[in-house]
């Protein structure tokens, strides 16, 4: 521990969410993240989401002022050995008047200790490579897995003949189970994610998707009468933005995107993806591909005998078997 962190720990207390002023937490997250983490939102998350630790967040407090916060999650994943939960840190915030004092570092250390004490072997997070926090996470042992890629082209190139068809999830109906909407998406995930590793297991119903996603922007991809995946798609001015969420392992992503583009006419199409075969497919199809993007999925081994390469092997990171969505990471 550095002298600065030791001095900080002497002066401050680390308290859990229930032991601090929630109005100060709201002010802190608005200042640091422009994120309105209201007491009502916190109560909803704790009631509906099974991933938060019992502490919910750890907070640095000095003279009754909340200096910083780190949220602590337990994220369900699938490894080559079966179910393995990993840690997830989120809402990492420092009050601007106390920047540079090592507040975030001290809280990250506390979060990692709690994860280890709960038997977790890895911690994960999502961030931007362009932000200041990215360097902080690297300093604390997080490794960028270089997962995300984007592809851009004109609508005319994206709109190609395809055997697949796309349908809004709000209108999609499973003839065999009678499911519609988010329940139908949960069923598709259960049926198709078994091919994958990584974030291929979710608590269901998956409340986070219901909270964060407009059902009108979800499109189910079909092959004949069988759903083979779903994507998020929305228009922004002249741009159609498609985020691939889940496709059956053998489904070509370029063809899946073509099925959505056929329903939504724009001037340009941008696709976000993570499977290496999809990245290669869009490159072969002549799209402008950026890999990696500024968005980062980072991972830290919590035990000294483990490495980031161990995580790559266990969860299939960097292969087509690794399943990830921005909904699953923190």
Image: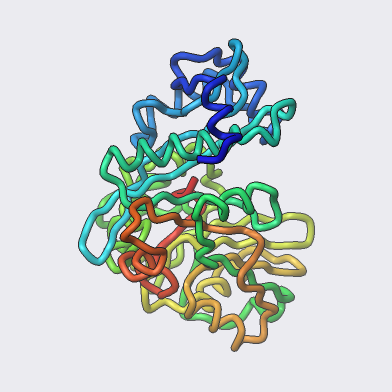
Q: Nearer the viewer, residue 1 or 287?
A: 1
Q: Nearer the viewer, residue 244 or 130?
A: 130
Q: Residue at x 35, y 40 (%)?
A: 115
Q: Residue at x 54, y 67 (%)?
A: 146
Q: Residue at x 56, y 65 (%)?
A: 148
Work out whether residue 187 can be spotted.
no
Drawn side of residue 125 relative to residue 228, left or right: right
Q: Position of residue 150 (x, y in %)?
A: 63, 69
Structure colour scheme: rainbow
Q: Position of residue 315 (x, y in %)?
A: 34, 65
Q: Is residue 229 above or below residue 70?
A: below
Work out whether residue 190 can be spotted.
yes
Q: Nearer the viewer, residue 274 or 110?
A: 110
Q: Residue furthest bottom?
A: 284
Q: Is residue 7 above or below residue 73?
A: above
Q: Position of residue 71 (x, y in %)?
A: 48, 34
Q: Is residue 290 above or below residue 286?
A: above
Q: Residue at x 61, y 48 (%)?
A: 136
Q: How many marks?
A: 0
Q: Residue furthest left?
A: 81
Drawn side of residue 127 relative to residue 141, left or right: right
Q: Position of residue 177 (x, y in %)?
A: 26, 52
Q: Is residue 187 above or below residue 54?
A: below
């Amino acid at each position: 521990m550095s002298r600065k962190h030791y001095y900080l720990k002497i002066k401050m207390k680390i308290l859990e969410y229930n032991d601090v002023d929630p109005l100060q937490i709201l002010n802190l997250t608005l200042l640091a993240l422009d994120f309105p983490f209201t007491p009502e939102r916190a109560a909803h998350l704790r009631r509906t989401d099974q991933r938060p630790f019992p502490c919910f967040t750890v907070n640095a407090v000095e003279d009754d002022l909340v200096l910083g916060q780190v949220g602590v999650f337990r994220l369900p994943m699938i490894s080559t050995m079966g179910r393995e939960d990993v840690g997830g840190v989120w809402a990492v915030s420092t009050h601007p008047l106390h920047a540079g004092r090592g507040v975030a570092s001290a809280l990250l250390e506390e979060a990692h200790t709690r994860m280890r004490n709960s038997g977790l072997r890895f911690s994960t997070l999502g961030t931007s490579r362009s932000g200041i926090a990215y360097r902080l996470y690297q300093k604390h042992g997080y490794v960028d897995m270089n997962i995300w890629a984007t592809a851009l082209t004109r609508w005319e190139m994206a709109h190609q003949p395809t055997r697949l068809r796309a349908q809004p999830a709000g209108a999609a109906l499973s003839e065999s189970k009678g499911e519609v909407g988010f329940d139908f998406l949960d069923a598709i995930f259960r049926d198709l994610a078994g091919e994958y590793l990584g974030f291929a297991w979710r608590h269901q119903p998956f409340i986070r998707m219901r909270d964060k996603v407009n059902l009108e922007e979800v499109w189910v991809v079909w092959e004949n009468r069988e759903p083979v995946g779903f994507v998020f798609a929305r228009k922004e001015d002249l741009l159609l933005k498609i985020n691939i969420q889940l496709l059956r392992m053998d489904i070509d992503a370029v063809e899946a995107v073509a099925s959505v583009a056929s329903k939504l006419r724009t001037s340009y199409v941008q696709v976000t993806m993570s499977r290496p075969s999809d990245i290669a497919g869009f490159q072969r199809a002549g799209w402008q591909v950026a890999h990696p993007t500024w968005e980062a999925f980072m991972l830290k081994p919590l035990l000294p005998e483990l490495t980031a390469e161990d995580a790559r092997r266990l969860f299939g990171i960097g292969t087509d078997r690794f399943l990830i969505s921005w909904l699953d990471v923190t």
